Amino acid sequence: MRPIVEAKGVSKTFTSGLLKKRRTNAVEDVSLAIGGPEPTVIAIAGESGSGKTTLAQLLLNLQQPTEGVVEFMGRDLATLSRRERKSFRRQVQAIFQDPFEVYNPFYKVDSVLHGPAKKFQIGRSMAERNRLIEESLNLVGLLPEETLGRYPHQLSGGQRQRVMVARAMLIRPQLIIADEPVSMVDASLRATILESLLKLNKELGISLVYITHDLTTAFQISDSIMIMYQGSIVEVGDVSKVIKDPQHPYTKLLVSSIPLPDPHKDWGTPQVRQENAGIVSAGCKFAPRCPVVMNRCSDALPPLYSSAPGRASACFLFDEHPALDRVELAGLFAPGPSARENGSEPSGIRG
């Protein structure tokens, strides 16, 4: 079975400046296969500026890659017919970080639910369509009578975000790409939204790409995880293994920065080189900050080495292992036992 969406060697370069052109590689040579015989939850994590959102836009066909291709069911997104594009929009839904940009302030929030329901023929009658809309709102913890009929500015940021989650649920796609879906929601509602997304994954077979900078929630809901740094993949594999035993120095830095629930325990003092932080490396992008940097790190970009079964790390520390090609990398995103299935708690990430 073909992946629902697959990126093959995708790069995205932005050019800025009038007199002196400056090129920024937001995404560089990323390959990723999503969906297949079994639904999966893939987390894409990294700090701000790592390329997560740009990659999401490429997967959603909102940006065109500078190099490489993104395919939907084996077809290049750039060559889809009008009918195929409609199918793509039906099967691949998005939840964005800032929901306010999605709303038209002159229309009530009902329009973001009724519009796609009508376009994609959700429900056989108006009564059934209304019932499904109310059911979707209830699933994300919203009362229909307190939500429908209001304008976007009359709802809180968290309520607007949950309406967008309800919209994705209503359409029942094959894949949901969620870019920081709980970033504007308070802690008491995060579990409600994430549990709703997991319910779609488990009960309806919908795959999920969860983009986040929060490794704790990634650990809780994902099957596999891809860590990005300055547009490149630095580590990938089973989420429980990557978070509990990080291999790449950058992943170790991220994990060490997770707050511990015990105020009497030190968060840890990760070693990061600061004196060369402003140097642009021709090799490994993390080399200027890496505490274990070697001479060769500044000369060549390390490939993704198969550092352990089901894992890969872009670090010369693992150069005794074979490098992965794109097909082998895609295989790492196959569903497997995740943190949520083995009963692990967030506090168990670091003991």
Image (cartoon, grey):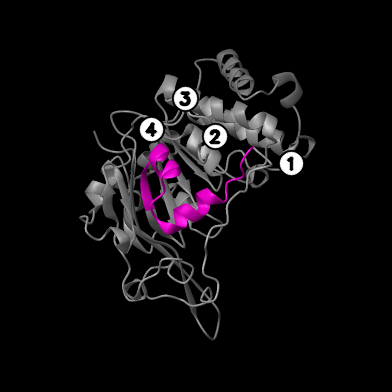
First in sequence: mark 1 vs mark 3: 1
Kind of residue at badge 2: Pro
Kind of residue at badge 3: Gly
Disc number at residue 343? 3
Residue carrying label 1: 106
User: Residue at image x 30%, y 56%?
Assistant: 304
Can you tell which of label 4 and label 1 is closer to the viewer? 4
User: Residue at image x 56%, y 30%?
Assistant: 194
Kind of residue at badge 1: Phe
Residue 227 in sight in this render: yes
**Image spot of residue 142 (x, y percent):** 68, 23
**Image spot of residue 41 (x, y percent):** 42, 35
Q: Quadrant of residue 204?
A: top left
Q: Is residue 27 above or below residue 171?
A: below
Disc number at residue 332? none
Q: How many marks?
A: 4
**Image spot of residue 108 (x, y percent):** 72, 33
Is disc 2 in contact with disc 1, using a CB cutoff of under 8 Å? no
Region rendered in magenta: 235-261
Residue carrying label 4: 40
What is the spatial separation of the Cα atoms under label 4 and label 2, in whole angstroms?
20 Å
